[in-house]
Amino acid sequence: MKKIFFRKPPLDLHGITHLDVQELVEDYVLTNQAYLPLQIITGNSQGMKNRVTKCLKEHGFNYQIGDAYNKGYIAVLK
């Protein structure tokens, strides 16, 4: 598997309530879309991952949930 290199610091959602996710993710990906791929750290919460992926789908971004060793982040690809 090819390693993904991120050019921007990740958006870390640890400690963020599920209600605030939509606004934070939209702001992060739309502001930094010129620097794709981006990393959003979700931890292992399936609810958090669902909210992030829903937001990414709404804006037409492709994504990958983690890698073989770490499923606690989402890579925003395009």
Image (cartoon, rainbow, N blue to C red):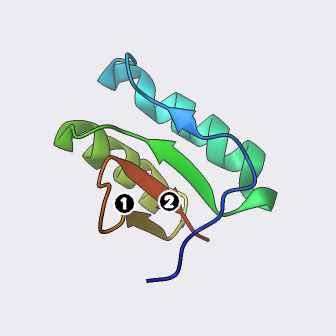
Please, which residue is most extreme toward the right here? 34
Checking the image for residue 75, the label placed there is 2
Q: Residue at x 36, y 39 (%)?
A: 42
Q: Which residue is mark 1?
A: 66
Q: Nearer the viewer, residue 49 or 19?
A: 49
- Is mark 1 in CB contact (under 8 Å) with mark 2? yes
Residue drawn 50% across the image and 59% down it: 75
Q: Name the quadrant of the N terminus.
A: bottom left
Q: Residues within 10 Å of mark 1 (few under 14, many from 20)?
A: some
Q: Residue furthest bottom?
A: 1
> Which mark is on residue 2?
none
Could you tell me residue 44's position as x and y percent?
23, 40
The quadrant in which residue 77 appears is bottom right
What percent of the width, then of the height, locates residue 23? 53, 30
Which structural element holds mark 1? loop
Give amino acid for label 2. Ala
Horizontally, residue 24 falls left or right of residue 71, namely right
Q: Earlier in the sequence, mark 1 or mark 2?
A: 1
**In the depicted structure, whether residue 12 falls above or below residue 4:** above
Whole-Å distance between the Cαs marked 1 and 2? 7 Å
In this view of the protein, which residue sits in the foreground, 65 or 59?
Answer: 65
Q: Is disc 2 surrounded by few (<14), some (14 to 19) or many (20+) residues within 10 Å?
A: many
| Residue 47 placement, left or right of 75 | left
33 left or right of 27 in image = right
Please state the horizontal and vertical placement of residue 20, each as a whole percent of the image: 43, 22
Quadrant location of the C terminus in the rendered image = bottom right
Determine the image quadrant of residue 3.
Answer: bottom right
Three-letter code, disc 1: Gly
Residue 14 position (above or below residue 42)? above
Look at 26% across and 48% down and name the residue there.
50
